[in-house]
Image (spheres, rainbow, N blue to C red):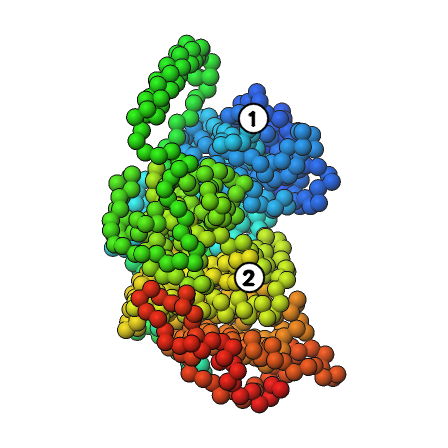
Amino acid sequence: MGILLSPKTFFFFFHFCYLLLLNVSACTLPDDYFINCGSSASTTVDRRNFVGDVNPNSFTLQTSHSSIATRSPSANSSPSSSLYDTARIFRQQSSYDLNIAENGTYVVRFHFSAFTSQDNNNIILSDAKFNVSTTLQFLLLSNFSVQNSSSNSPVIKEFLLSINIGKFRILFTPSGSSDFAFVNAIEAFLAPERFSPDSATRVTTKGNNESSEYNGLASNALQVVHRINVGGSKITPANDTLWRNWVPDDGYLVFANAAENVSSSGGQLTYLSEWATDCDAPDSVYNTAKELNISLSSEGITLPRQNFNVSWRFDVNQNARFLVRTHFCNIVSRAASDPSSFNLYVYRSFSKLVDPQFFSNVKLAVPFYLDFVVDSDDSGFMNISIGRQKDSDNRTPFLNGVEIMELISGSVSIPMESEAGKNHLPVILGSVAGGVVLIIIAVVLFWLCLKLRKGKPVETLDWKAMNLNAGSQYSRSTDRTVTGSHHPDLNLALKVPIDEILYATKNFDEKLVIGEGGFGKVYRGTLRDGTKVAVKRSEPGRTQGLPEFQTEIMVLSKIRHRHLVSLIGYCDERSEMVLVYEFMEKGTLRDHLYSSPKEGSTKASQSALSWDKRLEICIDAAKGLYYLHTGLGGAIIHRDVKSTNILLDEHYVAKVADFGISRLGHLDQSHVSTEVKGSFGYFDPEYYRCLQLTQKSDVYSFGVVLLEVLCARPAIDNLLPREQANLADWGMACLNKRELEKIIDPLLAGKIDSNSLRRFGETVEKCLKDSGVDRPNMVDVLWDLEYALKLQQTALPKQPYEDSTTDVSYNLPLPVINRLPSHSIAISEDEMPLETHIASSTNASEVFSQLRMDEAR
């Protein structure tokens, strides 16, 4: 018997079936594997049941040298989850064997939380250093440690692996000088179908056409590096479909004013199974976005937004390969039929047209994503941008989320269980006998070398340290390292034997490490003549390498100045790249302003520097930068001016350091075209947009340093409210409102003369102008800082009715000053370039003795 349906009934039936199809893609939560390591009890965390590994029934713990560590109840702070109250300790290579029942892509996470054990000889977990690998021949973590993590901030490392049915082994192996490894919890569960692609559009460092494909992604492991909720707030595992962490994007924006947040007005998202599901990203990612700002204002002029892109900058390993997933959902258009296509850029070499209508079937709020395999360059950063198409005024670019995952190729050989039971005694005995023979041969050869050696012993080397206050004769030559690489134009007179370096640093003793940067670790050292030095040693994988090494030598061997850190020598023997500088007793300027904020807490100012002393330090640094810009026939642009590159000697005299990415131009050049390099938070926005480096780029960065000195806080602090995260943006906003006194270091409250503060604020404001032509030269900055110091030193006594020198009197007029020509500021003879001298004998005190200060009596 047939059933006749009315048109209305048929419509509702069809609509119901359509909704069912839409929700077919909804996430089905897995239940294996979630392991609570070092515990006999199970614990539930965000809908996941972590089972104890003491008596496992669904997996196997392969070890005979493991123990349990339990967090001491007397610890000052503990994580919110009991998952981190225990850990499994491994004294030798050990493993977890998981039985995989289905082929597919698996999400594998490791949880680490450092604490001092109360039941394992007070073992300190942060001392561990170890490798984590798999039977798939992937080395997931190498020489990993949690030394930089606070005890209440667990470290979670996440990977995507393609695993087949059978036994999947995860191995933990102590490495280096450590004698143990540990883990608090493990997750390994099957990801949804199509969660990870096997191919994606290839983006090389030179760009490519869209037909290029990278195939074979499934043969690599993927490590999550960044997971960003663009335009939204932080998303915790409790609010994510697959227990992921998503962080806000504000701290990664290059130019904050170029974008504005937008969120869905509450409409329903329409998931289409062929594009994206709520497993790929939760609703809260697709319901928020950043779009290109309607207009950008600069000096009262409205600039058309089609001239600008919205750019994000992410730190990544250099010369590596990454899967980049960009998430989109059109919640910005008013109607589904409105034109909405725009351009997506990766670095500046690749662009992709994004057309939401292609994915949405002419519907709004349809989530989708685009995947790319991106080769990173040697900058240590990855830039992702969105921008309008040419002549497309009505189309607004937007972005909802970004995920960046590094590809890890299989490369390690893992011993299988079948090999464990073999009798290795003959091999061991043979190895020992061979070792003894080799030792005898080595001793004989060493004795012969001593007999035949014509050179002098290390203790009597002719090399002597350069006088820190003396110049160097620069000779152009070509040097070749033991590895065969050329170092053009290096000063051979500065070359230091490797034995002298090893002596000075006690074979690079880790106890002598005083800092770490983009080039490598910095060691405190003492030469044989007693001279204290700072030794910077290159490390593989850092953001700086051979080009920066060569640049530093070539720049510093040509200049000298009392406010530039002196290069004593360099070494390029035995595959080492080492730079030796004069030792700066008081460390970096930042060390004396604030400490680096840790996750979950923001450090307040810790500076003991007076306002006078801070001004003097800024003046010293300005003199160094002024010399760089003008002291040589070819001007030098530092390109990385920041508070950690301003060092203080024992008398708090400031010197500019780190010239590895400096550029040499000419005074008649308006700019140098170059790729963007520098430090996030200090970038000149004009330099980033136009790729044209000028001396005014240093002026902008120095303006950020001036704000750091005044406010005693980092240039970027993502723990602060959004509007305060970027110091330059926040400082300019306060300057525009004439509220600078509200953001100064609390330790300076009541100690700054109002006129001195006003002059300082005006100097900062000029340095941070968006356009380089509107910024002052360094000589003008130097003059203004000298003036601010003089105003502070000649401040009027406070009147009884004044409760602070940093109050509304900030708006009072400055004293009338007859400014002398800028060239009247003298530079002493030992600050002059080797090729030229400035004909002036007027010093700073003489300059100010000639000022007419009508109101400063």
Residue for point 41% across, 34% down: 138
Q: Nearer the viewer, residue 504 or 707?
A: 504
Percent across and percent down for residue 128 are: 56, 35
* Residue type at the position of mark 2: Tyr
Q: Nearer the viewer, residue 608 or 685?
A: 608
How far is mark 2 from mark 1, CA to CA? 47 Å
Q: Secondary structure at mark 1?
A: loop
Image quadrant holding the C terminus, namely bottom right
The reply to whether the C-beta atoms of the residues labelled 2 and 1 are less than 8 Å apart is no
182 in relation to 250, above or below: above
Residue for point 50% across, 70% down: 619
Percent across and percent down for residue 390 are: 30, 71
Percent across and percent down for residue 152 are: 64, 46
Q: Residues within 10 Å of mark 1 (few under 14, many from 20)?
A: some
Residue for point 47% across, 58% down: 645
Q: Which residue is mark 1?
A: 91
* Residue type at the position of mark 1: Arg
Q: Nearer the viewer, residue 18 or 340?
A: 340
Q: Secondary structure at mark 2?
A: loop
Closer to the chain start, of discs 2 and 1, is 1
For the question of whether residue 641 can be seen, the reply is: no
Q: Quadrant of residue 14?
A: bottom left
Q: Which mark is residue 491?
A: none
Q: Is residue 820 left or right of residue 717?
A: left
453 in relation to 315, above or below: above
Nearest to the eye among marks 2 and 1: give it. 2
